[in-house]
Amino acid sequence: YKINYNCEDSAGQTAYPATRTVIVEDKTCPTCTIPGSTDTITVEASFPYHEEASTCTDTLDGAMPDASIYGTVDVELTGTYVLTYSVTDKNGNGADPAQCSGVNENHRSGSHFTKTVVVEDTVCPSCKFVQNQDLEIEASFPFADNFKADVKCDDALQSDIVPVATTFSNGAKFTGDLTKSVGTYTIEYVATDSVGNTNAGGNNCKQVAGGPAAAQPVGEYTRTITVKDTLK
């Protein structure tokens, strides 16, 4: 804008006109509010992640559309993901925050900001008998624990986890040949996922994401073997 100044003396003599040039420019970056209540959030693996809308404003343009989001979150793969949010006003401020000369430092970094999303696996795996949970066998006859066919173990991220089988007799670990002694035995199948969550007690994983720390009920991952001597 040009402002012209003119004046004259009492005799009516006019001065040479003076001109001032006023440049109105916009060098203030727009600002945005990061979606959610914190810069870093933690989400459970394999559960849907929904991004909240951002709120962006500019001193000249006023309310602006939501920021563009650069980066993705893969909930099927544990790890740390950084999302970058960017918005640019009508005069191009925002594409390079270093060039903005806003009225405060918040404008300098306000147009490009990040949110860290941590995807973690805290859910217990579980085991389910698809057949033959409890068995009765004849003493002295060969017995093969076909648990790979009878028991299926998995969790939200892994399928077909192979459990570790441990035999107990009267609550004590049993390593002998159970077919040699009439009685009742318990075989426990413990599945452990790639990050150490197990279906057995004593761990801090969750049975349901967001639920209390818990493990699978014992009766769901154990089988009872009853050895009998019925032959004469």
Image (cartoon, rainbow, N blue to C red):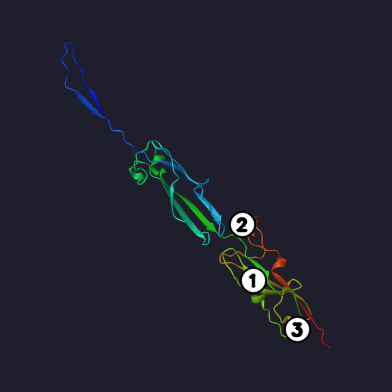
Task: Return the x and y of residue 208 as percentages of the image width and height.
Answer: 64, 58
* Residue at (46% x, 54% y) in the render: 82
Graded by Cα atoms within 10 Å as few (under 14), some (14 to 19) or many (20 or more), the crowding at tag 3 reads some
> Do the CB atoms of the residues marked 1 and 2 lie less than 8 Å apart?
no
Lateral position of residue 228 relative to residue 3, left or right: right
Q: In the rendered structure, which disc, 3 or 1, sits on the residue that comes first in sequence?
A: 1
Q: Quadrant of residue 171?
A: bottom right
For residue 161, above or below residue 72: below
Under circle 2, the secondary element is loop
Graded by Cα atoms within 10 Å as few (under 14), some (14 to 19) or many (20 or more), the crowding at tag 2 reads some
Task: Return the x and y of residue 113 as percentages of the image width and height.
Answer: 43, 47
For residue 86, above or below residue 77: above
Query: Which mark, by number, is residue 209?
Result: 2
Query: Which mark, by number, is residue 180?
Result: 3
**Frontmost residue, 26 versus 1:** 1
Q: Nearer the viewer, mark 2 or mark 3?
A: 2
Query: Which mark, by number, is residue 162?
Result: none
For residue 230, above or below residue 84: below
